[in-house]
Image (spheres, rainbow, N blue to C red):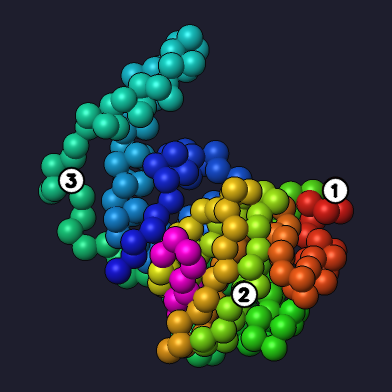
Amino acid sequence: MIHYHPSIETLTDYAAGSLPLAHSLCVSTHVEHCQECQQQIRKLEMLGSHLFDQAGTHSRQLNHLKDRFFTQLEEHTLEENDIEKHAQEPNSNHWGDYNIPSSLRQFITKSYDDLTWLRLSPSFKIATLYNEEGGAQIALTRVKAGAHMPTHTHTGNEITLVLEGAFSDESGVYRQGDFINRDASHKHKPIVTKDAECICLTVLDAPIEFTGWFARLLNPIIRRYHPYSRA
């Protein structure tokens, strides 16, 4: 069961098509596996369509649409029959050892194993999928069962979506499909459960910073591969 989801503001921007592409990819991958967010997006799209129909061509109303949108969202409930009882099964193919989400197939043509992985320790490696020029980085992290990532902080926002396996940190346990948002105020040490390796999709607005005395040696490597550092 998925316990961690994008915020209502993030889902609203996603439904409206105004979320940055890197973040939208992460939300889209989460939504493939999350019926709760599928239904929430359906509500947002229906309500947004209703509000914009009311707005018509009167541009003065556009400045108030967002406030009205959230006000009506809190008050608005849809009848159960207006929502499909069963969401369509996620469209994914079994490539390699894992099911690759359909939203990631533009980057992963065969399997996770065929990606170019940068090994940062014997148990931890990353693969960059896409760099926005001067912006966010879309990457995969892969950590062996029972291992951990070095303690680190964030110099910008980080979205993590668990694709396979599970990990924990000081704030909780995160399993397949969970959507975690971190900012510069967070410092944590993710530890992978002992039953399986953990693969996560990450979107980093800026490089992470390792804080351990040895792990700090990896920070120049992390910055070298992040587009924000080269802007």
Q: Earlier in the sequence, mark 2 or mark 1?
A: 2
Q: Is residue 150 left or right of residue 217?
A: left
The residue that disc 1 covers is: 231
Residue in the image at 22% along x and 29% along y: 75
Our reading of the magenta stretch's main secondary structure is strand
Please report whichever mark, 1 or 3, sits nearer to the chain's N-terminal start: 3
Residue mark closest to the camera, 3 vs 2: 2
Q: Is residue 96 left or right of residue 113?
A: left
Residue positioned 55% across, 43% down in the render: 19
Q: Which mark is residue 149?
A: 2
Residue range of the region highlighted in magenta in the rendering: 163-172
Residue 37 visible at all:
yes
Which residue in the protein does label 3 denote?
82
Which label's residue is closer to the chain start, 3 or 2? 3
Quadrant of the rendered image containing residue 202: bottom right
Rounded to the nearest angstrom, the CA distance separating label 1 from label 3 is: 47 Å
Relative vertical location of residue 196 with respect to residue 21 in this rendering, above or below:
below
Q: Nearer the viewer, residue 134 or 170?
A: 170
Compare residues 152 and 84 and report the one nearer the observer.
Answer: 152
